[in-house]
Image (cartoon, grey):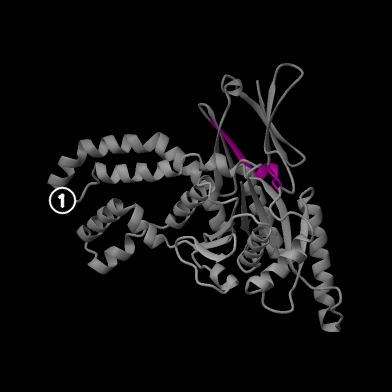
């Protein structure tokens, strides 16, 4: 089983790359499903077929899906939806407004995670390919298992007990609808569907993320930040795809400056992301739409190699022993400086904050009994000393 996550800045061509990779895998005889987590779906446009909220056959060995959060919300969270509509109605929203506002932001990511896990564990597919939303939404998607796990373990049951205790008083005094056990049970049932999804997506032998970039300064800068955040949450990036390169045979004075700039940015990509392989994809002379065009694109991109095989292995976490009994936990954080990182310790967790993203790392028993003595950067790894 292989899971491939394709992400990148909006407009870099990640949908084309994801669809082409899916076609390549299907041509190799692998049962492949490709799904889109981007609310602005374009996967169906790439295949030039209609795709629904459930797996739809595209060609032999290949299925596609475009997630519809509203349909899923009604199917899976009907009790939660009914409660939200009731609260909004009590607050003064009319029926139409209540129905619209009851779709909670971020549900696309939650349902997508559940789908990815279901596909991977169903036994029906050999390869799951995910056309992710632009980078900010992708980071939110992949950080959800940590966030939801923290909430369910530390807050959920306490909130449930408090709600039971205050429900009679609050309803008598204010009349505001209070969530019942059916609402909490619906949330818990859905969370259970996500159980194990983090372990699945951070297993480098199973799941790889691939960054799609164009040779442009802003795109490369965002890809570097994305690589840092993916590493923070323990996801394995195994390749960078440099898309829309001007072919060398194009020789026109008007393009000279563009080709020079692209060459400079491509050199930066190779240097910055080493040792990750960089796969070049030249700008096509026509729209890459339909199975035939996608197949040709994939052939140029992957040549004779296996499109779904793991292409790099950069370890994220490592624990090493020191000469005097100290232990060192190192975390792979590329493109990160010392001033960009904040560290905290809460009981048996190490809290690492990089930019706007925070992750709580549960420490193994060998480190829980020790204190943090300091931290430093060694190359692209954050090394935390425990004594």
- Where's residue 1, x and y in %? 61, 46
Mark 1, secondary structure of its residue: loop
Q: Is residue 283 above or below residue 33?
A: below
- The part of the image, by quadrant, that contains residue 35 is bottom right
- The part of the image, by quadrant, that contains residue 148 is top left
Residue sitting nearer the eye, 374 or 108: 108
Q: Is residue 347 above or below residue 206?
A: above
- Where's residue 187, x and y in %? 35, 45
- The part of the image, by quadrant, that contains residue 60 is bottom right
In the rendered image, residue 29 lying in the magenta stretch gets the answer no
Residue range (magenta): 333-345
**Residue denoted by label 1:** 175
- Where's residue 299, x and y in %? 75, 65
Counting the numbered discs, the total is 1
- In the image: residue 343, left or right of residue 376: left
Residue occupying image coordinates x 54% and y 73%? 49
- Where's residue 178, x and y in %? 22, 47
Residue sitting nearer the eye, 308 or 105: 308
In the rendered image, residue 338 lying in the magenta stretch gets the answer yes
Circle 1: is it few (<14), some (14-19), or many (20+) Cα within 10 Å? few
Residue occupying image coordinates x 56% and y 49%? 356
- In the image: residue 284, left or right of residue 370: right
Residue occupying image coordinates x 87% and y 80%? 251
Quadrant placement of the C terminus: top right
Spot the residue most to the left. 172
Spot the residue most to the bottom. 253
Residue sitting nearer the eye, 18 or 349: 18
């Amino acid at each position: 089983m292989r899971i491939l996550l394709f992400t990148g800045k909006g407009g870099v061509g990640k949908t084309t790359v994801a669809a082409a990779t899916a076609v390549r895998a299907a041509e190799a005889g692998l049962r492949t499903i490709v799904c889109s987590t981007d609310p602005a779906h374009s996967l169906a446009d790439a295949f030039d077929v209609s795709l629904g909220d459930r797996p739809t056959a595209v060609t032999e060995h290949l299925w596609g899906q475009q997630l519809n959060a509203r349909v899923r919300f009604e199917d899976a969270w009907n009790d939660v939806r009914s409660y939200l509509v009731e609260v909004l109605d009590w607050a003064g929203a009319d029926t139409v407004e209540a129905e619209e506002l009851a779709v909670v932001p971020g549900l696309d990511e939650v349902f997508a995670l559940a789908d990815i896990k279901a596909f991977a564990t169903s036994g029906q597919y050999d390869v799951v390919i995910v056309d992710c939303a632009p980078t900010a939404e992708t980071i939110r998607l992949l950080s959800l298992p940590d966030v939801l796990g923290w909430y369910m373990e530390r807050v959920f049951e306490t909130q449930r007990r408090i709600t039971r205790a205050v429900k009679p008083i609050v309803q008598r005094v204010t009349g505001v609808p209070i969530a019942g056990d059916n609402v909490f049970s619906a949330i818990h049932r859905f969370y259970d569907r996500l159980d194990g999804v983090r372990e699945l997506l951070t297993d480098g032998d199973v799941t790889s993320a691939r960054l799609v970039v164009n040779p442009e300064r802003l795109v490369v800068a965002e890809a570097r930040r994305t690589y840092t955040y993916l590493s923070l949450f323990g996801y394995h990036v195994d390749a960078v795809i440099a898309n829309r390169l001007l072919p060398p045979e194009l020789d026109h004075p008007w393009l000279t400056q563009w080709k020079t700039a692209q060459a400079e940015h491509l050199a930066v990509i190779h240097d910055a992301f080493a040792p990750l392989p960089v796969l070049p994809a030249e700008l096509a002379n026509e729209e890459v739409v339909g199975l035939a065009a996608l197949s040709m694109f994939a052939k140029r991109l992957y040549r004779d190699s296996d499109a779904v095989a793991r292409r790099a292995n950069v370890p994220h976490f490592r624990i090493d022993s020191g000469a005097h009994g100290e232990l060192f936990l190192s975390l792979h954080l590329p493109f990160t400086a010392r001033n960009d990182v904040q560290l905290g310790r809460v009981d048996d967790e190490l809290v690492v904050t990089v930019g706007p993203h925070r992750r709580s790392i549960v420490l193994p028993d060998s480190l829980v009994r020790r204190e943090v003595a300091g931290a430093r950067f060694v190359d692209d790894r954050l090394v935390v000393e425990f004594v």
